[in-house]
Every structure is written in C-alpha cells, then in structure tokens.
Image (cartoon, rainbow, N blue to C red):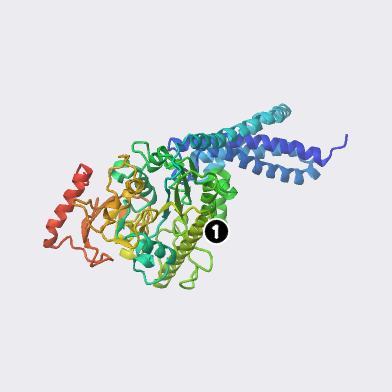
Amino acid sequence: MKDTFKDFAKKILALAVAFGLITGLVEGALLFGLHHFNLLTWRLQNRAIWYETLWIAPLVDVILFSLAGFVLALVGFPLRKKIPINRFGLFVFSFLAVFDWIFIVLFGRISLLPILILAAGASVQLFNMLSKREQGIERKLQNGLKWLAGAGIAVFVVVQGAGWMNESIKTSQLRDNADAPNVIVIVVDTLRADHLSSYGYERETSPFIDQLAAEGVRFENAISPSSWTQPSHASMLTGRYTYEHQAETRPLDDTYPTIGEVLQAQGYRTGAFSANTLFFTRRQGFGRGFLHFEDNYQSAPDAFFNSSLYGYLFDYYGLRKAFNYEGVPTRRLAPEINRSALRWIDRSDQPFFVFINYFDVHDPYTPPEPYLSKYGQTQGGLINGFLERYHPDLTPEQLQSEIDAYDGSINYVDDQIKDLFAELESRGGLENTIVIITADHGESLGEHGLLQHSASLYRQEIHVPLIVWGAGVPSAVVVDTPVSTTSLPVTILQLLNVNDGAFPSQPLTKLFGGSVPPGWAQPISEVAQFVGAAEQNPTTYGEMKSVVGDQLQYIVHEEYGEVLYNWRNDPQEQSNLANDPASATALKVFRSYLEELIGSPIFK
C-alpha cells in the first residue's frame, strides 16, 4: 500500500492534537489551581488566570502542537525511511508537555536554563516509557482523541455557559423599574485632575469633559482613597476605605455590599467593562454585583498572551526580549470598551448601571495619532511599567516629551467619551441618565522626583477629577470642599432617591447647594509598601497614609514620619510645614483624626 503524505500527516497530527489537549487541560488546571491558592510567582500570578483559562489553555496548546505536528510532517515525510519521525514527534510532544508543566511550577524560583534541563530529563524518561509501548500508546491516544476533545468542549460549555445562563436568569428575575434613571460611571485610569482644562490646566486637553463639567457639578478637590487601581476601585464600589475593605494586598471579598449589588436589587441591569485587565477584574473580586463583567478574553491576542503558558513565553521571551517590542499587545482601547458597553446596553430596555474603566491614559503613554504628537513631537513610551521601566533616567526634554504624550492620551479619551455620548444620544439613552466621570488615581510626572503612581500620596497621585452630570443634577455648580471618591455609592443612591443604608459615607449631594454640613469628614488616602518598585518611591520603604483638610494635607510614612503641606498656597507641595512649631497643633489634630477613624495607632 502506497504511503501518502496525507496518511503520514494524519497520524502525526492526531498525536499532536492528543498531546496538545492533555497538555492544555493539565496546564489550565495547574494555572487556575495554583493561582487560586496564590502559589504562582508574581509574574504568572498577575496574568489573566480565571475560569476561562481552563478552556483557553487546551485550545491554544492544540493549535500550537498541531502547528508543530504539521511542520514535522512536512519536513519528515521525505525522510521517513531514514529517520523514525513518529518517534521523534513523540519526543517533541513529550518535551513540550513536560516543559509546560514544570515551567508553571518553577518559573521565578529558578532560572530558565535549569527548567529546560529538568524538562529535558523528565521528557526523556517519559519518552522512554511511552516508546516501549509506542504503537499501543499511539493507538490509545488516537482512540481517546474524541474523549479528550469532548472534555475540552465540555469545559468550554460549562465555563462559558454558566456565565451566559447566570446573566440571563438573573436579568429575567429583575424587578420592574422601567422609569428609573440609568447610571454610568466612567473611570479614566491614571487621570490627574490638574491636567484637565476645566481644572485649570493651560492646555486644552479635555473640551468635552469640560463641557460636561460646566453643565453639571464639578468637584474641584476630589481625593482618591489610594494611589493605585485595586484599592481605589474597591472603595468606589463599596463606599469603604482601604483599612476597612483590605482589598490592597488581597482581592475584594464579600464583607461589604457593592453598589452593583444594591442597584441590582433595585431592578438595574449591571455591567462592568474594564480596560485595566490587571487589577479591575473578576479575579480581583470585582465581579460581585455585576450581571455582566468584561475584562480579559475579549480578543484572540488577549486570550493567547494572558491565559496560556506558551502565549506568556512568546510575550516575555519573544516580543519583549528578542524583538524589543515595547507595546502592550493585550491593551483594550477606549473604542473597544465603548463598543462592548453599547452592545450590552442595546440588549434590553431595562434601566442599566454601567461601570467603565478606560486605560488609555495609563503608561506607556502611546495614544494613536494625531493625539500622540498633538502637544509636541514625541514617541511616548519611555515610562513603561510593563517593561519594569518604572523610573527611567529622563532628561528634562524627555520628561516633557512624556508629559506631552500623557496629555495627548487625555485628549484621546476625551474624544472617545464624546463618541460614547453621541452613540447614547442617538439611541435616546441620555434623556434619563446620570453620568459620573472620575479617575481611580492620578500620576506623578516628575514632582518630588517621582514617576507613575503607587509611589506616594502626594497630591498629584490622589487629586482626581469628579464630575456629576445628567438627570436631576444641578447645572454649573463647582464644589470646592475636599471630598473622597469613596462617597460615590451613597451619592448614586441619593441621586436615585434610594434609601438603602448600605453605605456609611457622606452623600456628595449635600454639597450641591453650596454649604458644607457640620462635621463634614476629611478624605483620607492609604497605600501599602511596594517592595521591588522604583528605589525613588517612598512606598518602596514603607506604607503611607494621608488626610486632606480644607487647606492642609497631612502625610505620614511608616519609616519617614510626617509631612504637612498647605496645598492651596503650595499645590506642588514643595514646602514641608511639619517642622514649623506653628504646625504642632495641626499635626496633632490630623494624627488624632486618623487614629480615631482607623481605631488604632497609625503605625504600630
């Protein structure tokens, strides 16, 4: 019987697919299980590992193993009488499988070379065991292929089907609330307030946001409860400070209700759309209260790079190290977020609560043209935390170039928010809608010798925009009193005339009339120690806490002690008043305020 290429390739590809399915199913279980118990090293722990990993890993491995099998068949067919290609393929697939599993367990604990040596040794042992029963093993793998494929399909159906069914069933059970206003919360990740035109910036970076600010309520001095994403989002959803919800060193748990849960109980469809697929995600505990949550897995590149081991290897060792790629291949841009949110909104006429996170202002600052070069000829991207360039040594010209690119990113997002509003208006979706625009934190751009965020609690990292616009919101109101974005949940309920009592913070609606209620709380901010970040960052050496008063900001560092600034007269916070004898009383008051609020000494 003539030995055809088709028959030869079919045999090798069947072996490849079987090994790919086995490798991927085990890989998915390893990644998910070790991630759940926090046993992965930090590089893998921060990947997009969630239930979808259980089916994405085998799908990716089947494709990659099949490609390897096709190459083997193509190269090996002319050599099949001289070289035992089938046995060689068995060894290759054994190595790829063993290397995959060993790498997951040991990466970050030992270097790549020992992992390769261990994988080679283990795969030789596996190959020797399998080759002794080569024909029997191949036959069993081929016969079991349909069962392996069935297992992979079953995992996909269970994981994806459970999510679809859960949303469908819970949506159908929502109580009737047809006349209720819609609510949209837009969080522009890493947007500092003082780079918006409406907050006094000399560049016109935000004409549309400025328009909304003029038509609604603008809070001149909104303060984020932290200087990085995870704890600040937890506070915006629960109405609690970090010392309460503790979602900085761990995912958000179910101790406190979220605004999504409360609004869902009021008959709202609830959806979240996150471009920050590192920290505002379901795996960080933020899915609670949302019937629909989109973070990772919205594109093939995202699924490949973020939720499969070989995708990670290609990203880390291929794109980054071999090809010097400096972009973010899985970055979700604002137009994608808009399309996703609008598709979901269009599914039903029920009132909705939508929570959006735009990531385009976050480093690396590389907006598309014409935004990148709008404020100066720049390439952007010198500051790039994804490449661990947390604090590159920049010349004044390079720093200004990064600021230009940052401002271009703001202008880009401003236009995307304008586009979102236009689409909603064309659907009649703005007539009865409340919109809140804010940020999770700001950004250091050279002040105090710092870059990025989570570096400190200086004003540039916690002063964020806060604009409330829409149905029932007064027009052309500016609130000067310092407020916390932790007040968002209770403020939303007040705007909806819902008296749930789930959130203890003060509703910002009390400030709409221009007066400040007696005993108005001063906003606090907290940030943990970040070991391994830039050596210039104060948070590298200890945690920090802050209180923003009507004129003064108090900051206390775990190791460095206290500083005090008059942020109104000294917005760049250059003059530390803590050593001035005249400030002794203020320091004592701030210290006591923090300790009474937290219920313990500031730092034990």
- Report the residue that reaches farthest toward the front: 179
Q: Can residue 81 be seen in this view?
A: no
Q: Name the residue under label 1.
A: 325
Q: Which residue is drawn at 58% across and 49% down?
A: 299
Up-down relation of residue 412 to residue 34 (above or below): below
Indicate the position of residue 503 as horizontal and vertical percent values. 31, 42
Indicate the position of residue 228 as horizontal and vertical percent values. 37, 52
Indicate the position of residue 393 as horizontal and vertical percent values. 40, 65
Between 349 and 1, the residue placed more toward the observer is 349
Between 130 and 551, the residue placed more toward the observer is 551
Up-down relation of residue 98 to residue 318 (above or below): above
Q: In this view, does 571 lie to the left or right of 587?
A: right
* Kind of residue at badge 1: Tyr
Q: Quadrant of the C terminus?
A: top left
Between 531 and 371, the residue placed more toward the observer is 371
Q: Is residue 267 left or right of residue 501?
A: right
Up-down relation of residue 258 to residue 148 (above or below): below
Q: Is residue 461 visible?
A: yes
Q: Kindly state the secondary structure of the residue where label 1 is placed.
A: loop
Q: How crowded is mark 1: few (under 14 residues within 10 Å), some or many (20 or more)?
A: some
Indicate the position of residue 184 as horizontal and vertical percent values. 43, 51
Q: In which quarter of the image is the N terminus?
A: top right
Q: Which residue is drawn at 15% across and 61% down?
A: 579
Q: Is residue 379 left or right of residue 390?
A: right
Q: Residue at x 12, y 56 (%)?
A: 585
